[in-house]
Image (tube, grey):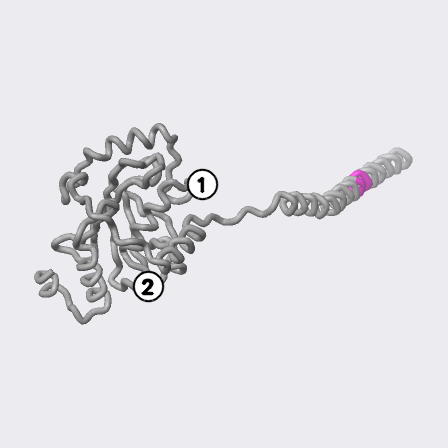
Amino acid sequence: MAEMSEKYNTKCPGVKRLMREALELAEATEEYCARPLEDNLFEWHFTVQGPKGTDFEGGIYHGRILLPKEYPMHPPHIILLTPNGRFEVNKKICLSISGHHPETWQPSWSIRTALLALIAFMPTPAEGTIGSLDYTPEERKVLAKKSKTWVCSQCGEIASLLSSTAAKPITEEEKTVLNQIAFKGEEQTPKPPVELVQEVETQSLESTEPSTGFLDQLTEILVALLVGAIGIFIYRRWNHFTASDTEL
């Protein structure tokens, strides 16, 4: 941290906040650990344990957290590197606590909050959201076993990064925050009720009927005028030839 103090402006709110969080997360736990890269305070690597009682139990998953210079006013981007069957690897995850949803981010949230939210979201349905996968339970369990031997090019074997130390209990405030995140997390555009869709479709059909009838009437009128014009032309030509024959 001393090197970080020399490299970055410690008076900057974002730097001050990240250095404080780095101290708070300095000791690894059995559930998660996270620390900044040695040469970049704004990129962190993290490791989380798969939630117990789920398809991810026993798995160890590693990823990156990319923090904007405006942190904590702007949210971080979260990227998983270990194949897991829930989130695409090397792709920014779409959560209300990530950079995909800056409108729902709150400066009071932290990297620990992001890690807790990520763990909570692993067993939830993918529902086609950005960066999500919907592998079968069997596939996820196989990946959970393989994850124990996964190696990060910068952090080494991820299985050794976690410890046996119990994580700090989740506070009531954090529970409230996680519930909010869980509610808003992977929002999609809400689908209208079936009744509303049917009503809209009925209205659309009804609204097109008068237009179709008008076009049919217009077509009939044009055809009638065209036939009439042709009839007049033929009649005049016939009269012209008749008059010529009479003169002769």
Relative to 10, residue 147 above or below: above
Residue 19 percent location from the top left of the image: 18, 62
Residue 53 percent location from the top left of the image: 35, 37
Badges 1 and 2: C-beta atoms under 8 Å apart? no
Name the residue: 37% across, 50% down.
95
Q: Nearer the viewer, residue 19 or 194?
A: 19
Residue 127's disc number? 1
Mark 1: amino acid? Glu
Name the residue: 41% across, 42% down.
124
Q: Earlier in the sequence, mark 1 or mark 2?
A: 2
Quadrant occupied by the N terminus: bottom left
124 within the magenta span: no
**Residue tagged by mark 2?**
108
Residue that lies at the very extreme toward the bottom in this rendered image: 11
Residue 167's disc number? none
Instruction: Please identify, in this view, whether the residue under mark 1 or under mark 2 is nearer the observer.
Output: 2
Relative to 24, residue 146 above or below: above
Q: Which residues are magenta?
A: 224-228
CA neighbours of label 2 inside 10 A, class few (<14), some (14 to 19), many (20+)? few
Name the residue: 27% across, 43% down.
80
Quadrant occupied by the C terminus: top right
User: Could you say whether the residue bearing mark 2 is in a helix, strand or loop?
Assistant: loop
Relative to 101, residue 138 above or below: above
**Marks 1 and 2, how far apart in space?**
28 Å
Residue 147 percent location from the top left of the image: 24, 34
Residue 222 percent location from the top left of the image: 76, 43
Name the residue: 17% across, 52% down.
27
Q: Nearer the viewer, residue 205 or 133?
A: 133
Mark 2: amino acid? Ser
